[in-house]
Image (cartoon, helix red, strand yellow):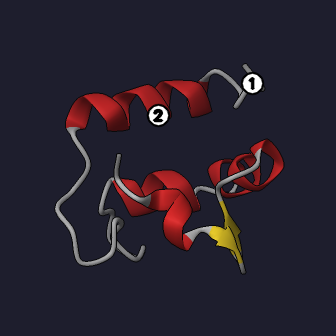
């Protein structure tokens, strides 16, 4: 619902595959961007920060080992 795949289905950040999503999750870029952390490009670009519940779901997935589930 945030439009991530519209921009991130190719290039340096690929979110339409598990492998691509896992890569940016594992290197910290995914959480840093969606959490609007200092030093990361805030995503969604030009939009409001994602809902805190959605961010927490992604954070939990990362903390649980970015499982393919």
The quadrant holding residue 48 is bottom left
Q: Position of residue 68 (x, y in %)?
A: 78, 26
Question: Are discs 2 and 1 less than 8 Å apart at CB?
Answer: no
Q: Position of residue 67 (x, y in %)?
A: 75, 24
11 is higher (above) or lower (below) than 42: below
- Mark seen at residue 67: 1
Q: Position of residue 20 (x, y in %)?
A: 76, 56
Which SS class for mark 2? helix
Which SS class for mark 1? loop
Q: Position of residue 11 (x, y in %)?
A: 72, 80
Name the foreground residue: 24 vs 27: 24
At 47% from the left edge and 51% from the top edge, which residue is drawn? 31
37 is higher (above) or lower (below) than 51: below
Q: Left or right: 43 with respect to 50?
A: right
17 is higher (above) or lower (below) than 40: above
Q: Number of labelled discs? A: 2
Per the model, the C-alpha gap separating discs 2 and 1 is 12 Å
At 36% from the left edge and 66% from the top edge, which residue is drawn? 43
At 77% from the left edge and 42% from the top edge, which residue is drawn? 18
| Pointer 2 or 1: first along the chain | 2
- Mark seen at residue 48: none
Name the foreground residue: 23 vs 10: 10
Name the foreground residue: 9 vs 52: 9
Which residue is situated farthest in the left direction here?
Answer: 48
The quadrant holding residue 33 is bottom left
Q: Which residue is mark 2?
A: 59
């Amino acid at each position: 619902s945030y439009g991530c795949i519209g921009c991130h289905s190719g290039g340096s950040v690929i979110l339409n595959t598990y492998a691509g999503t896992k890569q940016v999750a594992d290197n910290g870029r995914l959480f840093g961007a969606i959490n609007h952390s200092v030093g990361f490009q805030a995503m969604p670009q030009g939009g409001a920060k994602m809902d805190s519940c959605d961010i927490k779901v992604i954070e939990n997935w990362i903390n649980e080992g970015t499982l393919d589930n």
